[in-house]
Image (cartoon, rainbow, N blue to C red):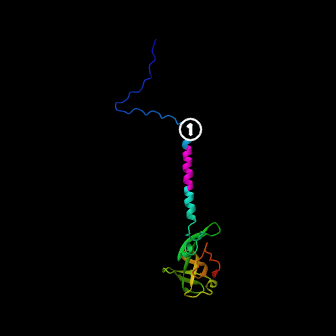
Amino acid sequence: MTTPQAPSTPDQTWGAAPAPAPKPARSPGRKIAAGAVAAVIVAGGGAAIWAASSSAATGTQAGPGAPGGTPGGGLGAALHGEYVSSDGNGGYVTKIMQTGEVTALSATSLTAKSDDGFSKTYTITSAQATGLATGDTVTVVATESGSTATATSVTDGEAGPQGQGNPPSGAPTRTG
C-alpha cells in the first residue's frame, strides 16, 4: 500500500518573497454598489459643469457677435477689435469694429482714430461717405482681407454695432 504524496512545490530560494495569495472575487452586491457610486459622481460632476457654464452665459459681457453685447459692457464698450463670424455660406470671415473720430475722408476711404490712439483706414463707398465729415464720431464694421479693410457699415455716433456688424435700430447707418 502506497500513500499518496503531496504535490511537489518548486524549491524556494532563500530570502525570496512568497507568491501573493489570490484576491477573493467581489460579490455581485459590491459591484452594483460601486457602479451606483460611480454613476452618482458622474451625474454630480455633469450637473456642476452645467451650472457653471449656464451661469457664465448669463453674464453681461459678451464677445463680438454674441448675444448680450450691449452698450456699457461687452461689445458696446469696445473702442476697436477684430473677430471672426460666419459668412453665411458655411465659411468664416474676419471682421473689424472700430469706434472713433473721422480724421480723413474721401469718396473711397475713411480713416478713424479711437480714443486710445488706434487709427485705421477703411475702403468705403461714396454712399457710406455721404453726410460724414472730418471730426464726426463713427462706428465702422469692416471685413478684412489681407491688408485691406472694407467697410460693411458706417454708423454715425458712438452707439456701436450689435450682433454681427449690425447697428442698433434707429442709428443712421450707411452700408455699401
Give the image location of residue 71, x and y in percent: 57, 75
> Does the magenta segment cover residue 39?
yes
Query: At 40% across and 32% down in the image, what residue appears?
Result: 18
Give the secondary structure at mark 1.
helix
Image height of 90 relative to 11, above or below: below
* Residue 41 inside the magenta-drawn segment: yes
Q: Nearer the viewer, residue 55 or 26?
A: 55
Q: Give the extent of the magenta segment.
A: 35-47
> On the image, numbered disc 1 is attached to which residue?
29
The residue most toward the left is: 14
Work out which residue is located at the far top of the displayed protein and give it.
Answer: 1
- Give the mark count: 1
| Secondary structure mostly taken by the magenta-highlighted segment of the chain | helix
Say which quadrant the C terminus sits in: bottom right
Q: Residue at x 61, y 85 (%)?
A: 129
Location of residue 91 in the rendering, given as x and y in whole percent from the top left corner:
62, 67
Quadrant hosting residue 48:
bottom right
Q: What residue type is labelled 1?
A: Gly
Residue 117 percent coordinates (x, y): 48, 81
